[in-house]
C-alpha cells in the first residue's frame, strides 16, 4: 500500500495535481511570463546558433584534409620572420582564442585588441575595420603584417615546398605546387608592399607576372586551409541556449539553466536596455559597424575605423570579387558594391559577437575596458563628449541606452556570463603532430 501511495504521489506531482495527502504540488514556474511577446520573439531569434553559412569563395571550406592542414599552419611559428609568432600567439585557445591583452602583440605591439576566432565563421566582415571579407583573406594579412608575423608570401611558399609533410598535405588538397626550386624565377623572399623601393617589393616586381600569380595562388590556398580549420572553431551550447530551449518547450528543468539574475539581465538585453539593436541574431552581433563615441585616450592616435578599412578592402586582390576567390560573382561581391560612404563610417568599428564574451576581456577595439561592468558603465553613463576628443560622430542608437542601476548592471553581467558555450574539443585546440 505504501508503495502504491508513493507512486501515485509522484505521478500527481509530475502532472501538477493535488496529491492524495492534500498537499498541493506546485506547478513548475514558466519563465515565459517574464517577457512580453516582442521580447520572447527577440530571444528566440538569438538561439540556437544554427548551421554554419556556406562559404562559396573558398572551395575547400569544409574539406577535412584542408582543415587538418590549416590547423597545423595555425600553430606553426615558422610562418613568421623570427620563427616565434603563429596565429595561435594572439588567438590562444585557453583564452577563448583571444590573448587577454589590451592590444595584440606579435613581433611588436599592435594598434588594436585581438578579436576571438571562435564562431568567426558566422561573420561576413573581418578585422575591427572590416578590411577583409572572408576568413581566408583575413588569415593572410597577419602573416605579412609588420607588427604581427612579418613574413612574406614567397618565403612561406618556399617553406611549404621544402617541408615534405607540408608539401604532401598541400598537394593532397590543392594540387601541384609551382617550380619553387628554380630560384632564378622564385627568389627566397618577395612580396608586394607599400614601399616599392624595398628589397622584397623590388624582388617581387622583377618576377614574371605568371610566377607572381602562382605564388599568390599558393598563398591564398594557405589562407583557405586556415579558414577550413577556423570553421570548426564553433562553441557548443551555452546556458542561454539551454534556457531558450526550455522557454520554447516549456521544460522547467532547462529553463533553470539561467539564474534569476541572468534572466532579469536577458529581459533588459532584449527590452529596456536596447542592447538588442546592435547585438542581433544567433551570434548576438549585427556584423556591422558603429561609432560608440569613445573618447581618445591620452596619447592615443585617432583611428578612422571602418572609414579607413574600405579602400584596403577594395584594393585587396584576395577579396571576394578578386581572381583568387572561388566564386567572384556571388553575394560577397554584391556586398562590396554596396559599401556606404567612408565619411559616414568614421570612427565606426565592427560589433563583436557576445557569445563567449566573458572569456575575451579586455574590451573595445583598443582594449580600454578591463571587464564587463566597465563596458556597461560606459554605455549607461552617456556623458557628453568633447567633439575634439571624438573620431567621427557617435551612433544615434547610443542615445537609446538608459541609465542602469547597480543591480541592473549586475543582472546584465550575469546574462553575458551565461553566453559562454562549451569549448571546441581538445583535438581542435592543440597543435597537431603533423598537417
Image (cartoon, rainbow, N blue to C red):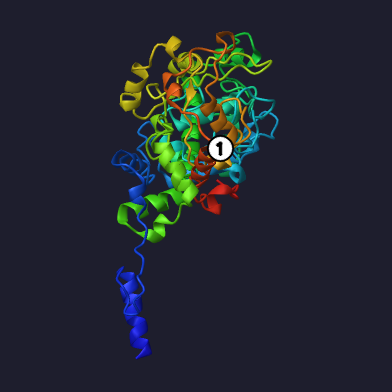
Residue holding disc 1: 406
Q: Residues within 10 Å of mark 1 (few under 14, many from 20)?
A: few
Image position, residue 263 (x, y; %) = 44, 47
Q: From the viewer's perspective, tell me whether residue 423 is left or right of residue 90.
A: left
User: In this view of the protein, can residue 238 be seen by the observer?
Assistant: no
Quadrant in the rendering for residue 397: top left
Query: Looking at the rendering, in which quadrant would you find the N terminus?
Result: bottom left
Image position, residue 358 (x, y; %) = 56, 42
Vertical relation: 246 (above or below) 402 = below
Image position, residue 321 (x, y; %) = 37, 22
Element at label 1: helix
User: In this view of the protein, can residue 173 be seen by the observer?
Assistant: yes
Depth order, front residue of 76/342? 342
The residue sitting at 62% across, 35% down in the picture is 90
Q: From the viewer's perspective, tell me whether residue 302 is left or right of residue 271.
A: right
Extreme-front residue of the structure: 22
Depth order, front residue of 308/214? 308
The residue sitting at 54% across, 13% down in the picture is 391
Image position, residue 292 (x, y; %) = 50, 22
Query: Looking at the rendering, in which quadrant would you find the C terminus?
Result: top right
Vertical relation: 140 (above or below) 343 = below
Q: How many marks overall?
A: 1
Extreme-bottom residue of the structure: 1
Amino acid at each position: 500500500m505504501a508503495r502504491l501511495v508513493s507512486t501515485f504521489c509522484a505521478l500527481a506531482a509530475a502532472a501538477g495535481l493535488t496529491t492524495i495527502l492534500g498537499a498541493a504540488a506546485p506547478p513548475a514556474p514558466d519563465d515565459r511570463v517574464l517577457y512580453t511577446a516582442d521580447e520572447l520573439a527577440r530571444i528566440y531569434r538569438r538561439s540556437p546558433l544554427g548551421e554554419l553559412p556556406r562559404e562559396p569563395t573558398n572551395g575547400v571550406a569544409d574539406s577535412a584534409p584542408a582543415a587538418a592542414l590549416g590547423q597545423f599552419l595555425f600553430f606553426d611559428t615558422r610562418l613568421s620572420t623570427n620563427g616565434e609568432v603563429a596565429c595561435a600567439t594572439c588567438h590562444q585557445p585557453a583564452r577563448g582564442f583571444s590573448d587577454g591583452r589590451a592590444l595584440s602583440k606579435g613581433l611588436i605591439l599592435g594598434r588594436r585588441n585581438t578579436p576571438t576566432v571562435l564562431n568567426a565563421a558566422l561573420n561576413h566582415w573581418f578585422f575591427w575595420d572590416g578590411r577583409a571579407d572572408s576568413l581566408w583573406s583575413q588569415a593572410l594579412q597577419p602573416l605579412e603584417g609588420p607588427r604581427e608575423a612579418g613574413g612574406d608570401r614567397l618565403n612561406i611558399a618556399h617553406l611549404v615546398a621544402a617541408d615534405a609533410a607540408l608539401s604532401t598535405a598541400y598537394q593532397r588538397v590543392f594540387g601541384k605546387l609551382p617550380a619553387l626550386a628554380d630560384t632564378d624565377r622564385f627568389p627566397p623572399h618577395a612580396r608586394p608592399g607599400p614601399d616599392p623601393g624595398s628589397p622584397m617589393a623590388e624582388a617581387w616586381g622583377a618576377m614574371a607576372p605568371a610566377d607572381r600569380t602562382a605564388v599568390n595562388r599558393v598563398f591564398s590556398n594557405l589562407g583557405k586551409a586556415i579558414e577550413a580549420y577556423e570553421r570548426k572553431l564553433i562553441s557548443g551550447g551555452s546556458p542561454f541556449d539551454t534556457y531558450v530551449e526550455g522557454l520554447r518547450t516549456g521544460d522547467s528543468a532547462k529553463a533553470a539553466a539561467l539564474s534569476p539574475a541572468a534572466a532579469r539581465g536577458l529581459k533588459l538585453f532584449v527590452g529596456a536596455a536596447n542592447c538588442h539593436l546592435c547585438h542581433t541574431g544567433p551570434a548576438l552581433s549585427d556584423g556591422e559597424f558603429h561609432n560608440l563615441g569613445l573618447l581618445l585616450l591620452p596619447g592615443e592616435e585617432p583611428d578612422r575605423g571602418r572609414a579607413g578599412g574600405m579602400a584596403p578592402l577594395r584594393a585587396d586582390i584576395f577579396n571576394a570579387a578578386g581572381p583568387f576567390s572561388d566564386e567572384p560573382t556571388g553575394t560577397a561581391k554584391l556586398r562590396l558594391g554596396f559599401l556606404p560612404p567612408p565619411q559616414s563610417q568614421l570612427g565606426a568599428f565592427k560589433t563583436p559577437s557576445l557569445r563567449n564574451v566573458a572569456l575575451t576581456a579586455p574590451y573595445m577595439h583598443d582594449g580600454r575596458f578591463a571587464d564587463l561592468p566597465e563596458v556597461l558603465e560606459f554605455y549607461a553613463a552617456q556623458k557628453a563628449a568633447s567633439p575634439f576628443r571624438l573620431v567621427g560622430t557617435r551612433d544615434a542608437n547610443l542615445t537609446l541606452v538608459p541609465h542602469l542601476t547597480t543591480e541592473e548592471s549586475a543582472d546584465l553581467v550575469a546574462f553575458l556570463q551565461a553566453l559562454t558555450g562549451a569549448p571546441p574539443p581538445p583535438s581542435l585546440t592543440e597543435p597537431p603532430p603533423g598537417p
